[in-house]
Every structure is written in C-alpha cells, then in structure tokens.
Amino acid sequence: MKILFLDQSGKPGGAELCLIDIAKPYRDSCLVGLFADGTFRDLLEQQQIPVQVLTTQSLAIRKESSLVQGLGSIGQLIPLIARVVKTASKYDLIYANTQKALVVGALASFFSRRPLVYHLHDILSTEHFSSTNLRLAVTLANRFASLVIANSQAAKAAFVAAGGKPEIIEVVYNGFASEKYLAEESSLNHLRQNLGLDGQFVVGHFSRLSPWKGQHILLEALAHCPDDVTAILVGDALFGEQDYVEHLHKQVAKLGLEQRVRFLGFRSDIVSLMTACDLIAHTSTAPEPFGRVIVEAMLCGKPVVAAEAGGAIELVETGKTGWLVTPGNPQQLAEVITTCRQQPEYVATIAKESQRQASQRFNLTNINQQINQLLGNLYSALPCNELQQADKSPPF
Ligand code: UDP
C-alpha cells in the first residue's frame, strides 16, 4: 500500500510527532508532503521517511480564520492542490494529518480518485476553531473521507456533535515505544545540577507556549506552593504566540517567582528532562484532544496532574494513574502539587502503576497494527480496477 501523507506544518507539534510513528512502517513506499519547511522535515529525514515540501508559500488560513480570510487564500491553494493531485497519482491513498491537509487532500482525492483518510488530532469545537473552519472540516470529511481516525473518544464525540458521520470515524490512540522513555539515572543528577534544580521539588510543564496550554495557571499555582517548589517550562511559541510569552515573563516577575521558574524553550531531550522532574503538570484550559505529554510522563515513570477535560480524562484516573483537576483552577492544582511533595512514597506507587498501564495501552506496535488494519480494510474494499483506471487518466 503506497501512502501519500499530507501535513501543513513545518514544526513538530503533537500531530507531527505522531505522524512520524505512523509513517515509519511505510517508509519504503510512502511520501510525506508538507505545506511548510522546518525542523519537522529534519525529523522525518532522520528516520529515513521520504519527505517533500510541496509549497514555499505559507498558507494564510488559521484555525480561527473567517470565511472571507479563507476565500482570500484560494489563490495560494490552487497550485498546491494541483501539485498534490499529480503526486497522488503515484500513491494508493491520501492520508491528511491536519486540517489544512484535509482541505487540500479532499480536493486532491476527488480529482485523483484516491481514497482519503483524515487523522483528526483536534477537538472540533468553537473553543479551538472558527465556526467557518469547523463547518468546513466536517463537511469535507463527510463528503470526501472514507475513514476518519480520531486520536481520542473526546475528539470523536466532538466530530459527531459537529455533524460528522459516526459511521466513518474510528478511535486510535497515539502509540509510543516505551523503551525510549527510560532515561539513564546517571545523567539525571548532572542535568538537575546544570539546571540549578538540586534540592527543589520540580514540576515540569512540557508544551508549546500558547494561552490554551495554560502555563499561566501553573505559574499562579506555584505562588500558592511551598518555596522549594520550582517549575520548568519546556516548549516554545510554535505558532506566533509571542504576546503570551511576554505575558508569562511579566507574570513571573509580578509573582516574584524569578528564582523558581525556568523557561527552557523547545527541547528534544524530553525523556531526560521529564525524568529529572518530580511531577509533570498538564494545564490546558480548553479540552485537550489527546495529550501526548501525559502519556510520555507516565512512560517516564513520573506522576502526572492533568486538566480534567477532553482526551486527558481517557488517559488519567484520579488516585490510580495520576490526578485530574478542574481546568483553569490554580488553587486546586497547588493543592495536588503540595500533596505530591509531602507524600513521595504514595506518589511513586501511582507513577509506577501508570507507567505499567501506559506501556500496555499505548504500545506503538499494537497501535500501528490497528492503523494498518484500518487502512488495509479500506484498500481491499476498493474496486480492484479503480486505481488502475485512475492511473491512466490523471486530471492534471
Ligand atoms: N515537545 C517537544 N519539545 C518541547 C515541548 C514539547 O518535543 O520542547 C513534544 C512533547 O514531548 C509532545 C508534543 O511535543 O510529544 C506535544 O504533543 P501534545 O499532544 O502534548 O500537544 P500538541 O502540541 O499536539 O497540542
């Protein structure tokens, strides 16, 4: 099965990191087409996954774009769609991994007569999207996708609630190779020393800096915690949220937390950093579609406190595999952090159980098999001469 994967981003967010794991088993016969260049391309190349940047123009449409702004970008889209149609004629199916990839992939699927799969990594609600974009995503998926893969029950429920067809959507969680999440103990002391974290109770936050990821909630909570509680914020503003970054720095100064907060920027040594923490906090203020960082923390054997909404509810069970707190509630978060600091043995038991469960539930080999089976079913259901017919008459 030859797959043309499409993704709009040049930067590695959660959807892109997930795509690396999905595309890798198909690397001898697939292509990942990107709508922007950047470090995501480097990561694909490091894994020997064929990749091509399909346009050098950055697409002006954003999640919150209105109809008028969306229409304004049509001039940019036409050459890109034409290129994808031409490329798709060499592949058996189109796999759109993001929303802009769905727009391009849907039209390319129509013209190239290739089936379309849409991997939904979003909660399609007005908290995350303009109503125009939401309607567009659901309409295109309903009309053109043979299969939608949702990354959580929460993402599936939002899709159906927004009018998506329930019969075309399946839930497949992100997969993780658990052996990659075991850090060398010997390097950890060194890392903690280098970061000036010795003798501190370290709370890690691993996420791009963006208002809905709620780093400000952790900072507010920190002000209510004992003085030896320190936070590291790992991640950068990937999609231009510079105002929020400034706001966070001002908040640190206002709360007098300069000695207790470190901004580490985007890092690739997530496993070492997580393992160097005592607790990982997830603080999204809007429902998280899945929450890779939650599973990664579990696999690192670290306790997690997460905001009780969206996919996080499917990942964490309070008192068994971590703690869930009300989104946007710093007081409650501070209470959990303080309890965790006071009860290290109880917390370690929970972390161990969550590590055991996560390595089973999110086993990469099993998840890849589920995806392979879904794609295989789709492929074998195609009329056997359809692809050959289409090969003879590419529309561009
Ligand atoms: N991440 C990273 N470096 C950073 C911050 C985050 O590699 O500095 C990774 C993190 O480990 C996770 C992904 O980015 O795998 C974020 O995925 P998640 O589902 O948590 O959020 P998203 O970015 O998809 O909203």
Image (cartoon, grey):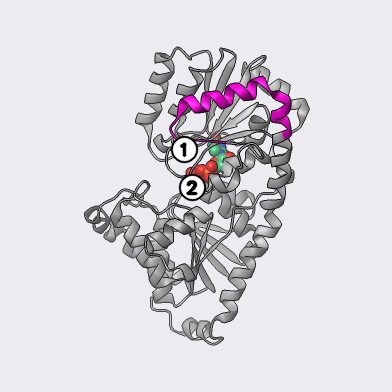
Name the residue: 60% across, 79% down. Answer: 380
Position in image of residue 75 (x %, y %) = 27, 60
Q: Position of residue 382 (x, y in %)?
A: 54, 81
**Ligand 1 neighbours mark 2 (CB distance < 8 Å):** no
Does residue 49 show up? Answer: no
- Do the numbered discs 1 and 2 sit on residues whose CB atoms are within 8 Å? yes
Report, in whole angstroms, how far the alpha carbon at label 1 lies from the one at label 2: 10 Å
Instruction: Residue under label 1, please give it.
Output: 284
Tell me if residue 334 is in the magenta stretch.
yes
Q: Residues within 10 Å of mark 1 (few under 14, many from 20)?
A: many
Looking at the rendered image, the disc whose residue lies closer to the viewer, 1 or 2, is 2
Please state which amino acid type lies under the numbered disc 2. Answer: Gly
- The secondary structure type at the circle numbered 2 is loop
The spot of residue 122 in percent (x, y) is 45, 52
Q: Which residue is mark 2?
A: 310
Foreground pick, 75 / 335:
335
Residue 101, image x, y percentages: 43, 59
Furthest residue toward front: 319
Residue extending furthest toward the left: 68
Looking at the image, residue 115 lies above or below residue 176:
below
Tag 1: amino acid: Ser
Residue drawn at the location 47% of the way across and 48% of the way down: 10
Magenta region: 324-349
Position of residue 224 relative to residue 323, above or below, is above
Image side of residue 383 versus residue 79, left or right:
right
Q: Which mark is residue 19?
A: none
The residue lying at 59 percent from left, 46 percent from top is: 315
Q: Main secondary structure of the magenta part?
A: helix
Residue 384 seen: yes
Q: Quadrant of residue 356?
A: top right
